[in-house]
Amino acid sequence: MSRKILFLCTGNSARSVLAEALAGRLGAGRLQAYSAGSQPKGVVNPGAVRWLEANGFDPTSFRSKSWDEFAGPDAVAFDFIITVCDNAAGEVCPIWPGKPSTAHWGMPDPADAGSSEAENDAAFAETARVLTARLEQLLSLPLDELSGPALKERLAAIGAAQPETIA
């Protein structure tokens, strides 16, 4: 059974886009991934575009969009909603259809990593590494057996792990 997951960030231009791409690839057949932002920038960050291209993704498949696209009675019913930036975690979110399990997987914004393209690219690679490890942990869970508070607790534990300790 394929689960639907939405990654939220304020601008939906970097972390949440990488999370959408990675979840779609790693969770193929198990996860349908989406991303959105509370205040979308309207364009995917150039560092994210470079990372997507370098890792075999078609960057034109991703766009910066508002979370309003996924709110309301006719919207996709998500199984999971994960915030990946601290600003989005603190915002009042829309009412999501269904009863998704939510968690915060905060991490630094790779777009703010440095002034050079090399520093920026290294930050995007590190963000992707941490997201990959977290998604692998999510995909290792018995998702068909977990629900409610137990699932929420496991999702929170994945997000609480310090990036340097994630394999």
Image (tube, rainbow, N blue to C red):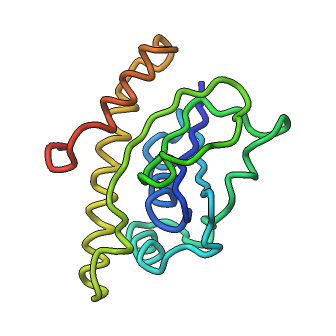
Of all residues shown, which one is farthest toward the left?
Answer: 165
Question: Is 125 left, or right, of 67 in this rendering?
Answer: left
158 above or below 113? above
Q: In the image, residue 10 lies at what x, y percent?
A: 54, 60
Instruction: Count every numbered label the image shows and give the total.
Output: 0
Instruction: In this rendered view, identify the residue nearer to me: 61 or 75.
Output: 75
Q: Residue at x 47, y 49 (%)?
A: 25
Q: In the image, residue 60 lies at what x, y percent?
A: 62, 72
Of all residues shown, which one is farthest toward the bottom?
Answer: 116
Q: In the image, residue 154 lies at what x, y percent?
A: 36, 23
Quarter holding the N terminus? top right
Of all residues shown, which one is farthest toward the right?
Answer: 74
Q: Residue at x 41, y 17 (%)?
A: 142
Of all residues shown, which one is farthest toward the top?
Answer: 145
Which of the 4 image quadrants contains residue 40? Answer: bottom right
Question: Is 154 left, or right, of 99 in this rendering?
Answer: left
Q: Residue at x 74, y 52 (%)?
A: 68
Q: In the image, residue 164 lies at what x, y percent?
A: 15, 50
Quarter holding the C terminus? top left
Instruction: In this rendered view, identify the residue nearer to me: 109 or 76.
Output: 109
19 above or below 81? below
50 above or below 32? below
Question: Is 4 left, or right, of 149 in this rendering?
Answer: right
Q: Residue at x 48, y 75 (%)?
A: 49
